[in-house]
Amino acid sequence: MTTHPEALGTAPSALTTAAARKLATTTKTPPQMQGISPRWLLRVLPWTETKGGTYRVNRRLTHTLGDGRIEFVSTGADVAVIPAELREIALLRGLDDEATLRTLAENFTQREYAPGDVLTTRGEPVSELLLIAHGRLVKLAAGQYDDEITLGVLAGGDHVGDQILTPAPGAWQHTLRATTRCTVLALPAQRFEEIAERSPALRGHLDQVLSRAVPRQNRRGEADIALASGHVGEHALPGTFVDYERSPREYELAVAQTVLRVHSRVADIYSEPMDQVQEQLRLTIEALRERQEHELVNSREFGLLHNADLSQRIHSRTGPPTPDDMDELISRRRKTRYLLAHPRTIAAIGRECSKRGIYPDRVEVEGTAARAWRGIPLLPCDKIPVRADGTSSVIAMRTGQEDQGVVGLHQTGIPDEIQPSLNVRFMGIDDKALISYLVSAYFSAAVLVPDALGILEDVEV
């Protein structure tokens, strides 16, 4: 312990540091902020100029009857399907009879399955419609050499067995086995037929849908373009045209805003050596950019997590994000450019790789070394949520308008702009001598074709 000389009753023989500091100039840092992240999504997205504040995505006409995900409500341990959600089943899309939908929903029975239980067996007749309310199941089929191969994974919101809505349901093409504890709602085919007999609206709807002539399509569901090849001589060539979507999606620029207030006295006499207004603006802009990235990931209107096509959403086969899951994710699209995941998810991927003795490469992105999977940068993004049950998601995307990928939207050249699509506008001084500045950032994101964006969902971290 150090004792001050004055405490011992002796006078100091030299100027003390405490007194010397009264004349010294303190070396200071600019204001620091813990909430600043790398914001990789903002850095790697190609930004497209959006004049007029709206961006329209024109696509070829696609013929789909419905391929949505079903939602449920629960009361304690009891689970029920929301009647309107039954329209997400392809053959029920467009059915507007609420009473019939309610009757169908009430006739589902709840079942519980343990890991390893078999729900359907390949080759047996399809006798019921199954809605997956909770859990994970794997679809299995016989391989070429009598081994068992995996066709895919089903999880909460998926459904199978909608063949019972047709006159000839046929047989199951796969075996469905639970890999976790599962809650399933089942509607027997016989019960559905009884409801259909009492509902003219349901019978008429199904007759119309099943008799509808669906134009020829390519494997993506787009209207086919008639072509001829391999012919010789004066072969009659087919005529064709490329049809477009009747109602293309339009993205409007969203905004993140705040009003920054600085007292005139602070701005006038406390701005040396650092400008108080500039430091306040700097930190406010950092917070706006953080919110911008959060919205690009989580917004229900244009965020990546909510705008990935259902055909591009896959589930982990075992829970944690394994190398097999990562390969499945990037195989869903050509030219996957970036992978984004929460840092905890990246750590979980690393653990699974270490278990198999796999050591992923590192690549350079904008001068920074980053982890990679199959040469594709795996970038951290803490805006991807880790849910209360310890699950998260991995985003895979192709970027750029030239590659029909994901693009960021903004508009440059706005009034009082200080960064691209971000401006600071003076709002005046009130009677309390507070100077006000309106700080605004305008942005959005667009997915040009469905396979540009994929999600590995509900991975355990």
Image (spheres, rainbow, N blue to C red):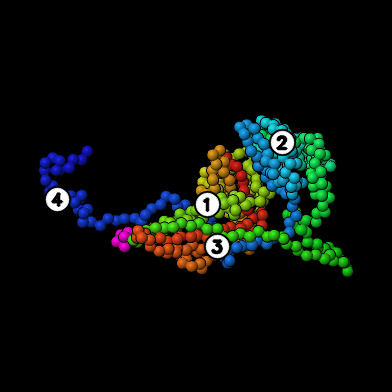
Residue 282, percent from left and from top: 41, 58
Label 1 – label 3 distance at C-alpha:
16 Å
Q: Please give the name of the residue rendered at 47% of the width and 63% of the height, measured from the top-left corner.
A: 423
Earlier residue among tags 3 and 4? 4
Earlier residue among tags 2 and 4? 4
Q: Please give the name of the residue rendered at 73% of the width and 59% of the height, measured from the top-left corner.
A: 61
Q: Please tell me whether mark 1 or mark 2 is closer to you in this view.
A: 2
Q: Nearer the viewer, residue 242 or 268?
A: 268
Number of numbered markers: 4
Extreme front residue here?
431
The kind of residue tagged 3 is His
Earlier residue among tags 1 and 3? 1
Earlier residue among tags 1 and 4? 4
The kind of residue tagged 1 is His
The reply to whether the C-beta atoms of the residues labelled 2 and 4 are less than 8 Å apart is: no
Q: What stretch is highlighted in magenta?
A: 265-270
Residue labelled with disc 3: 410
Q: In this view, does 2 lie to the left or right of 188?
A: left
Residue labelled with disc 1: 294
Residue labelled with disc 2: 106
Label 1 – label 2 distance at C-alpha:
39 Å
Label 4 sits on a secondary structure element that is loop
Label 3 sits on a secondary structure element that is strand
Residue labelled with disc 4: 14
